[in-house]
Image (cartoon, rainbow, N blue to C red):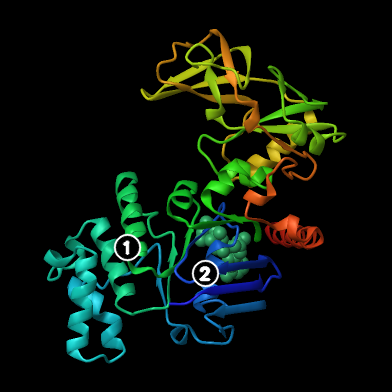
Amino acid sequence: MAAIDMKNIVKKYGDGFPAVNDVSIDVQDGEFMILVGPSGCGKSTLLRMIVGLEDITTGDMMIGDKRVNDLAPRDRNLAMVFQNYALYPHLTVYENIAFPLRLAGAPESEIDQKVREASKTLELDEHLERKPGNLSGGQRQRVAMGRAIVRDADAFLFDEPLSNLDAKLRGQMRTEISRLQKRLGITTVYVTHDQTEAMTLGDRVAVMKRGVLQQLASPRELYENPGNLFVAGFIGSPPMNFLPAEVDGTSVKLPFGTVTISEEKAKRAQGKGLLIAGIRPEHFEDASVKDSPTAGSTFSARVDVVEWLGNEAYAYIPFEAPPEVQAQLTQLEKDLDGESMRTQLVISLDGASRIAEGDEAEIWVDARKIHLFDPSTGENLTVDEARAGRIHGREDPSGMAKAEAMADEGEEIHSADEA
Ligand SMILES: Nc1ncnc2c1ncn2[C@@H]1O[C@H](COP(=O)(O)OP(=O)(O)OP(=O)(O)O)[C@@H](O)[C@H]1O
Ligand SMILES: [Mg+2]
């Protein structure tokens, strides 16, 4: 096993496009690290540079205490499981798992011992003599993992290994991978664009946008203290609500009413003009089912749609946003790869709530949970930096600006290609 330390990694493809842009991530020995972000943000490129399938333009890739930039993939001792894991259809499950060992010329006794050990861990014992064609998607996935396990690799690398499975199986496999990783204690880097997978599997999660690392933190830190609008909008489902906000002292004027925030937050937002407030759906509630709505504020609003799910309900409240805020939200929608970001408030209500479509409802909001973002930079002004992991721009603002500028250049190169 080994730690993987990526230091200022840059990848420019032949056309000059910086697919990965000055990314530094320290994966600890035994840690489960997730790389997450929308399509094209550079996740697979980064993973392929760890394994050695892609050259590194600049930066240092350290595995253990060795710099591996110039090492061939087979000399890095890593096991990779891809989205389209190719099993050999004419070989049995046993032989599929044994394959890398046979390739390495291992003695028969060692092969047998390792295959049986892996098969036990993966609960494949009763399938060892079957062919992959007769297995379910989840079983095939486990065979692919078995092949990775027997190699005694220093780390596991996964590139969207579950994206071909249906939702139920995906959930099961997620739990299984998590259990397996904990049991084996093996350093793992896992690529996904699914924020649920990122939140449930990762010890830490690296959120990327257009080749630039946005924030590196535990799932909880990301959820509670997103460093910018992009991370705030990407992590959480349904997503965080973004509303135009005007701060005056400790009062924040929102489209549906005014709430009070702490002096500490107010100080950080002072004099910044029109801001974007971020409040998660679950920080609202039907005021009539809330036991003692003391800590927050209540307001009344017209609810236009209610989706009742049994344990909870989602209510939608449309609102108007001024053009500056609207422009930032439209850009955000684009960055998030089309997640719908209309100017409507989504609030999560207790299943017991009787609020119905068309009601003028009394809604309670927990104003302590509000975030305030600068609409020009997207930066979260009220973030608790001690509990937010690493936010790229906060470490070295000039570095972040430089990386973003490079990404813009890259985009121009791309648009020129398309034209
Ligand atoms: N061989 C290549 N030549 C040129 N550009 C490439 C090449 N491979 C990838 N890119 C570009 O690099 C960027 C990152 O691609 P990458 O495959 O790493 O994204 P990703 O985050 O894995 O996306 P997805 O979720 O769609 O798999 C993209 O803009 C892509 O167009
Ligand atoms: Mg990819």
The image position of residue 23, as x and y in percent, is: 65, 66
Closest to the observer, 12 or 199:
199
Indicate the amino acid at tag 1. Answer: Leu
Q: Residues within 10 Å of mark 1 (few under 14, many from 20)?
A: some
Residue 387's disc is none
Label 1 CB sits under 8 Å from any ligand 2 atom:
no
Residue 28's disc is 2
- Quadrant in which residue 324 is drawn: top right
Relative to 14, residue 391 above or below: above
The image position of residue 10, as x and y in percent, is: 67, 71
Closest to the observer, 284 or 147:
284
The image position of residue 91, as x and y in percent, is: 19, 75
The image position of residue 256, as x and y in percent, is: 68, 17
Q: Using residue 376 as the reference point, say whether residue 259 is left or right of it.
A: left
The C terminus lies in which quarter of the figure? bottom right
| Residue, disc 1 | 180
Q: Residues within 10 Å of mark 2 (few under 14, many from 20)?
A: some
Relative to 230, residue 349 above or below: above
Looking at the image, can residue 208 be seen? no
Looking at the image, can residue 402 be seen? yes
- Quadrant in which residue 152 is drawn: bottom left
Q: Using residue 187 as the reference point, say whether residue 22 is left or right of it.
A: right
Closest to the observer, 138 or 189:
189
How many numbered marks, from 0 up? 2
Q: Using residue 256 as the reference point, say whether residue 308 is left or right of it.
A: left
Relative to 187, residue 168 above or below: above
